[in-house]
Amino acid sequence: MERKQRQDDRLGNSLPDDLPQALMVEGAHGPTIHATNRAAQQAGVTPGARVTDMRALCPSLHTDYADLAGDQAATDRLALWAQRWCPWTVADRTADGHGLILDTTGADHLWGGEAAMLADIEASLSGLGFSARLALAPTWGAAWALARFGPVRAIWRDERDLAGLPVAALRLGADTVLLLNRLGLKTIGALSAVPRLSLARRFLRAELADNPLLRLDQVTGHLPEPVSPAFAPPAFRADARLAEPIFDPTHHLPGLCEDLSTQLAAQDQGARRVRLTVYRTDGEVSRIEVATAAPSRDADHLAFLFRDRLERIDPGFGFDLISLEATTTERLGKAQTTLAGERDEVLDLSRLVDRLTVRFGAPAITRPLPRASHIPERAERRAAPLTPLPEQPAPQAERPLRLLDPAEEIRVLYAVPEGPPAQFLWRRRTHRVARYQGPERIAPEWWRDMPGTRLRDYFRIEDETGRRFWLYREGLHDDGRGGAPRWFLHGMFA
């Protein structure tokens, strides 16, 4: 309901707060009440009741259809935004939903204790226009029960906090709650006092939502119910918490990179993917991500990669928390480059690739990668610089640095049909052969080539001027796969 009111305020369609308002959804017997504002609650409008009955009770009730998909998307965004307090956050998908579950284990001391953390959460949600009932407990089930049926802000002390709550606080189905109430078991304390064997006989085959024994075990922690976010939180994260909202993270980026690099160095790790996230004051999250061609924990280099991308962040009305996370890391031990203190050319190349990728985009930058094939034009493929290196294929004979694609046909003169050429004509120029090496025979790949494909005999040729070429003869005399052999120039050596 509050999300709908915020949307109406932005569009200028807001209604008076003292007007009873409700959102409805289609039910089995017509529209039913889904959510209400405070004025409707005071008028006796209750969720789950039929709209026609509630209009008879409250003639001034203003209704509109609920946007369930929009509510779910908004809850998912809030779950990401709630990572400002701890990395393990999920949107509640059980029972009535519309809640957030945060695993704050080991995080409350960062906020001055449990009470201070709850106060900060409540204030932040209030700034977004959302009211909230908060609870802190050792289990998901206990926190869910206290948040909905306990005080407005509850902190777990012991199991006696749950004893007086209704059995509906166990996230049981409506039929099961009705059955337990008819049996006189109206509170969690009364239900816990019943021997388990008696309950097991009645609910042995019941599903989780209709099994009070399993729900009791979840509340008390005997049955685990871990918080599993959509993606695992990174192990390396640096945060900058700001006293006032800002619109540009540039000045805070170097310090975040230094902090992250220190964490990576302590574990002998280097970052391959780094994500910068800003948590906006309006509840939205904006993020950008960079990748490196090689593991890196150079703070200056990481900061440089983000420099040209900061303009892509949508600051909204400002943000008060900046997070830098290494989402993908690889082992990177300490290494001395050279005894003379010279620069590491391999490292410089990887940094150059990173900067070109940031400037022009990953699709514009490629590098050659080996491929397991003896056919020269198939032994290499182009891939993005960030593509992991494959397993190295079997070593081959020396190949020229430059290949012609496609190979160019030449005319040759030779002394014997199976021997090397004595001279050849290429691009209207005659080259006399001074030295040669070969042949190196390469057979067709029968599992890929068409039937009748001829083999190749490669020769390394040096002409009278010292230039070296890579020629091949396609086919043999009387091989039954065509006429006379053809000659091609396939590459040049440096």
Image: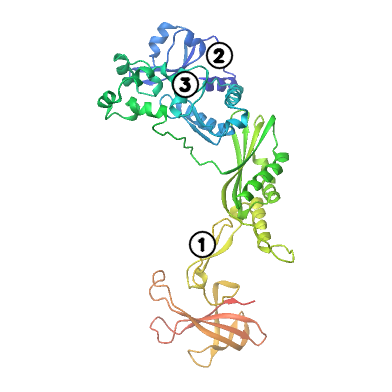
Residue 22 position, x and y percent, is: 47, 15
Image side of residue 386 versus residue 215, left or right: right
Kind of residue indicated by mark 1:
Pro
Asked which colour scheme the image uses, the reply is rainbow
Residue 268 in sight in this render: yes
Residue 94 to residue 385: above or below: above
Kind of residue indicated by mark 2:
Leu
What residue did someone put label 1 on? 390
Q: Residue 15 has which mark?
A: 2
Look at 51% across and 12% down and name the residue there: 38
Residue 401 to residue 166: above or below: below
Residue 46 position, x and y percent, is: 42, 13
Task: Please report contact status of discs 1 and 2: CB closer than 8 Å, yes or no.
Answer: no
Under circle 1, the secondary element is loop
Work out whether residue 35 or residue 427 is closer to the camera in this orientation and state it.
Answer: 35
Q: CA distance from mark 3 to mark 2?
A: 32 Å
Q: CA distance from mark 1 to mark 2?
A: 62 Å
Q: Nearer the viewer, mark 1 or mark 3?
A: 3
**Crowd class of label 1 (few under 14; some 14 to 19; many from 20; radius 10 Å):** few
What residue did someone put label 3 on? 146
Q: Nearer the viewer, mark 1 or mark 2?
A: 1
